[in-house]
Amino acid sequence: MSDKKVRVRFAPSPTGGLHLGGVRTVLYNYLFAKKHGGDFIVRIEDTDQTRFVPGAEDYIFECLKWAGLEPDESVQHGGNYGPYRQSERKELYRNYADQLVAEGHAYYAFDTPEELDQMRQQYKTDENPAPQYDQKVRMQMRNSLTLDGDTVHELMHSDTPYVIRIKMPENETVSFNDMIRGEVSFNTSVVDDKVLLKADGMPTYHLAVVVDDHLMEISHAFRGEEWLPSAPVHVLLWKYLFGEDKMPQWAHFPLILGPNGKLSKRDGAKYGFPVFAMNWKDPKSDELTEGFKEKGFLPEAFINLLAVLGWNDGTEQELFSIEEMIDKFSMDRVHSAAPNSIMKKRNGSTRSGSKNWMHRL
């Protein structure tokens, strides 16, 4: 551990119910922060307005309050590093995106949806059934790398929609140290030129997460392993914008598996085991997904279940108070492999224990 104050964040998108995997990410962030006398921040990542679901943000905070995992800083709790909702930070991102373009690390892309579809069809092969906008095709597209300066200027000042894409270097190795997995390396040639700033001026996750983690002085960034493929983009953005030495320490948690792979709410409906913390009713479809709270589970038991789905203290102990979890928690005891399904049977009961077990705390 460095002398830098521990500051961790959970950054959900307000697009629906809070999945078990999300609550476990919250829990591990919370335990790590409290263990080291640090701060736990919740930052709402609502840059994709097309997926915004009314009520989802309040639902997230209600779940965290029920579970006893309330943040030190957030939209609802305030703090010195706000705003804590990305849509209210929109003006912060543009300058960083333009800086990347000016330094040759990104470029303006004017391709229409029709041109993008045409590219995917033109470059589609049996070996590459889903072509991406990458080093192999970018010089065939309509962007500031292929157009002359006057044309680019004219397009940008004539209300022509455009995005800003990172210019991924060719055949470089990008590495970082993961607190759970050790050294992780990627070859940049297999990573596409991700959009950083969308046509509406909103950043994508890739740009926003780096800028916000820097401005909010995040010391450790913990997230699910589904974000590992994006890690080389984020490492490069840290390097280009702020210096790789300023990057938080990262850890990527394994997924929580269902009986047939990644746990989904359909698994919960099929097996009668919740996958959300609390009831969630989709305002668009009126579909109700039942939660642990409404099933009668105690919040202390709920977080105990999540704690041991991917972590142990090296003993046979299975029941922990929150104080014991804080005292015993360490990242080197978090497993890199995905835990068994919470619905997997063992000795006649679920892996996490029967419902009676859940009420023993």
Image (cartoon, rainbow, N blue to C red):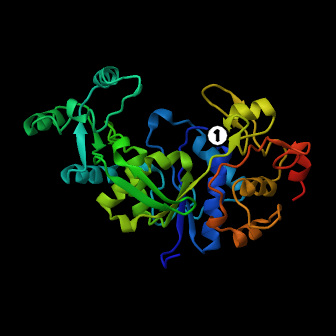
Mark 1 crowdedness (10 Å alpha carbons): few <14, some 14-19, many ≥20: many
Residue 247 picture location, percent across and down: 41, 64
The quadrant holding residue 211 is bottom left
Q: Is residue 74 among what the camera can see? A: no
Left or right, 194 with respect to 32, comes to left
Q: Is residue 167 among what the camera can see? A: yes
Check the image and report above or below for 274 versus 130: below
Q: Residue at x 56, y 37 (%)?
A: 54
Looking at the rendering, in which quadrant would you find the C terminus? bottom right
Residue 45 picture location, percent across and down: 48, 47
Residue 286 picture location, percent across and down: 67, 26
Left or right, 116 with respect to 250, comes to left
Check the image and report above or below for 37 versus 203: below
* Viewer-proximal residue among 117 and 347: 347
The residue wearing badge 1 is 17
Q: Residue at x 43, y 46 (%)?
A: 205
